[in-house]
Amino acid sequence: MRPPSGSWIRGGVGVCALVVLAGVTVIEPRSASAQSRTHWLDLYGQVVAGGTTGGGTAHGTTDFFDSSEGFASGVNLGIRLFVFDLSLRFLQMIDGNGASSTLSSALLGSALEIPLVRGGEDAFGRPRPPVVVLRPGLGAGFGLGTPAPVHLPIDNAQLSAKGLLVVARCGVERMFGPYFGIGAEAEGGYHYLFGQAATINSSNDRSQGWQLAIFTTFTAHFGV
């Protein structure tokens, strides 16, 4: 199994360090009114841009995250209810020849919205939305990978990988009002993927291993 490269480790550590720094600089405790301004229901749409990498042990195929690593951009649509989160994501990888692999995923899990920097109060003494928010989360679900740009509707002939994804993520977001934020997010996890010709009783045409990603995020929130 190929270990993460040094540049990716440094990048992940850098993003996590930014998250920690944002947290430790807020030394005053959050008031009850500030905590109440976090959303218990959040419908969100997100544009992401960054990079992915990964590796694994493959049998009769190549590991999807190993062969498709590089720049990636895409969209993420989701809904969070209290701490339960459902998200649908599409990523388009880009290499030196242009658009290449894609990854579509559906993940169900938990996510938190933790205010780090309060937004103060308005003229009527009501708390404003937080200015900086920490967003850790954990999810598991299904992923579909293709070696080339997709042509709708997606069928099995276009797939090179399909299977289980487990993803842990941690992001920090700077809010510009209650509805829009720009942030950075680091994520990593585990995958167990079947190739196009894999069968349940065969040990060939499958791979398992790790994946990492770092993204800049642009998010619209519609919550209560």
Image (tube, rainbow, N blue to C red):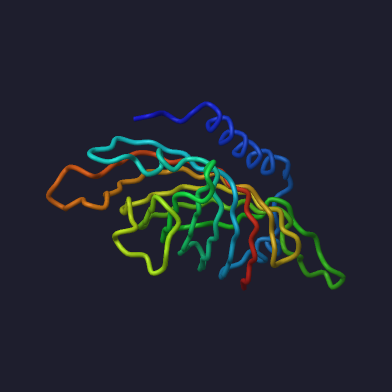
The quadrant in which residue 64 appears is top left
Give me the residue at 60% from left, 50% from top: 49
Give me the residue at 59% from left, 57% from top: 113
Residue 196 drawn at (x, y percent): 26, 52
Q: Is residue 84 visible?
A: no
Residue 97 drawn at (x, y percent): 52, 44
Farthest residue in the front direction?
97
Residue 24 drawn at (x, y percent): 68, 40
Q: Is residue 136 visible?
A: yes
> Where 34 sits versus 12, above or below?
below
The quadrant in which residue 203 appears is top left
Query: Is 37 left or right of 164, judged from the image as shown?
Result: right
Residue 32 drawn at (x, y percent): 68, 61
Q: Nearer the viewer, residue 104 or 210?
A: 104
Give me the residue at 59% from left, 38% from top: 16
Give me the residue at 73% from left, 41% from top: 25
Q: Nearer the viewer, residue 176 or 217?
A: 217
> Where 76 sits versus 24, above or below?
below
Farthest residue in the left direction?
201
Instruction: Tell me the quadrant of the picture where the N terminus can be found.
Output: top left
Instruction: Tell me the quadrant of the picture where the C terminus can be found.
Output: bottom right
